């Protein structure tokens, strides 16, 4: 594929679509094996972005194919969470069926919903998988950007152990839960919500909310000027930061840029080796395989 041969590092906007993994290795075959992937097809970033978007929309157990990037500054990125190759652990299923969640919230759910939930619970957690991968590759990270009312977080494991993980319920409320010791990638970043940081540093806790409300009200009367709300908000935030010295928030993307490789900051400065591939999961092999054309 001539376009693949000419491709140079560029922002992987697929990172805003789905969960991704980062492994410090150039052994693509080992990565495919670790995730239970097969039938790799050479893929451009554009092709990978479509696959990542598919995995963002569908539940984990419906993941049929995964995008594995070229080697980027020594890291290989995997877009998707193909858990189907992990065997069911009957002990985990038994524990799940004895849980309060199963006996209360799940009791009236349809059988197919119950079975899907038990299947998810029968497999290792994301942090457990990350620890396992780190035992094989020396280190392993997972990242997922949070959206409005959609969870996000990250995990960092080294030599078979998870050393840091974070969970964000959504990017609206900024309720970040951290586990493990602080990681160097977090230095200078803010874990607490804006209002909490402002209150702790002598500012009115709703100072930023008031600015955002003002922008919103102003936009109602000025929609014809064509300036996006986000652009105005970001400019106001930059000024607000200068005034208050409030740090940037910890986000999966910022941690990735510091701890591994930032998908959105790839460019001419990034060392690239090999090429990306789209490969099939166990579900993909049982289905129709590689189907449908992808943009190149």
Image (cartoon, rainbow, N blue to C red):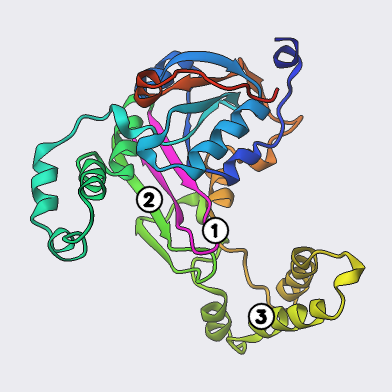
As drawn, the label of residue 147 is: 1
Q: Residue at x 53, y 27 (%)?
A: 67
**Looking at the image, is mark 3 or mark 1 nearer the viewer?**
1
Residue bounds of the magenta highlight:
138-159
**Of label 3 and label 2, which has the lower sequence position?**
2
Tag 2 residue: 164
Tell me the distance, in whole angstroms, between the alpha carbons under discs 2 and 1: 21 Å
- Asked if residue 247 lies in the magenta stretch, the reply is no
Quarter of the figure that contains the C terminus: top right
- Examine the rendering and report whether any part of residue 159 can be seen: no
**Looking at the image, is mark 2 or mark 1 nearer the viewer?**
1
- Asked if residue 154 lies in the magenta stretch, the reply is yes
The foreground one among 239 and 150 is: 150
The foreground one among 247 and 46 is: 46
Tag 3 residue: 208
User: Residue 233: horizontal and vertical position, in percent?
Assistant: 75, 70
User: Residue 126: horizontal and vertical position, in percent?
Assistant: 33, 43
Asked if the residue under mark 1 is in contact with the one under mark 2, i.e. CB atoms within 8 Å, the reply is no
Q: Residues within 10 Å of mark 2 (few under 14, many from 20)?
A: some
């Amino acid at each position: 594929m001539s376009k693949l041969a000419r491709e140079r590092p560029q922002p992987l906007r697929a990172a805003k679509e789905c969960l991704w993994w980062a492994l410090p290795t150039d052994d693509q075959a080992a990565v495919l094996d670790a995730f239970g992937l097969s039938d790799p097809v050479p893929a451009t970033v554009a092709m990978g972005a479509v696959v990542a978007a598919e995995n963002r929309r569908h539940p984990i157990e419906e993941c049929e194919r995964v995008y594995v990037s070229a080697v980027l500054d020594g890291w290989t990125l995997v877009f998707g969470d193909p858990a189907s190759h992990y065997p069911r652990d009957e002990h985990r299923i038994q524990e799940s069926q004895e849980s309060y969640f199963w006996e209360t919230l799940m009791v009236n759910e349809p059988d197919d919903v119950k079975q899907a939930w038990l299947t998810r619970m029968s497999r290792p957690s994301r942090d457990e998988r990350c620890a396992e991968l780190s035992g094989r590759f020396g280190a392993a990270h997972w990242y997922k950007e949070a959206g409005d009312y959609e969870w996000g977080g990250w995990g960092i494991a080294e030599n078979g152990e998870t050393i840091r993980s974070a969970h964000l319920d959504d990017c609206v409320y900024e309720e970040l839960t951290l586990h493990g010791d602080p990681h160097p990638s977090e230095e200078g970043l803010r874990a607490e919500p804006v209002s909490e940081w402002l209150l702790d540093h002598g500012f009115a806790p709703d100072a930023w909310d008031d600015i955002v409300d003002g922008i919103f009200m102003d936009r109602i009367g000025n929609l014809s000027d064509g300036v996006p709300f986000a652009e105005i908000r970001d400019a106001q935030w930059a000024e607000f930061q200068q005034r208050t010295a409030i740090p940037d928030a910890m986000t999966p993307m910022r941690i990735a840029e510091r701890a591994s490789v930032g998908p959105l900051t790839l460019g001419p400065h990034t060392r690239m080796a090999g090429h990306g591939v789209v490969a099939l999961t166990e579900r993909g092999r049982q289905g129709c395989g590689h189907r449908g054309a992808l943009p190149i």
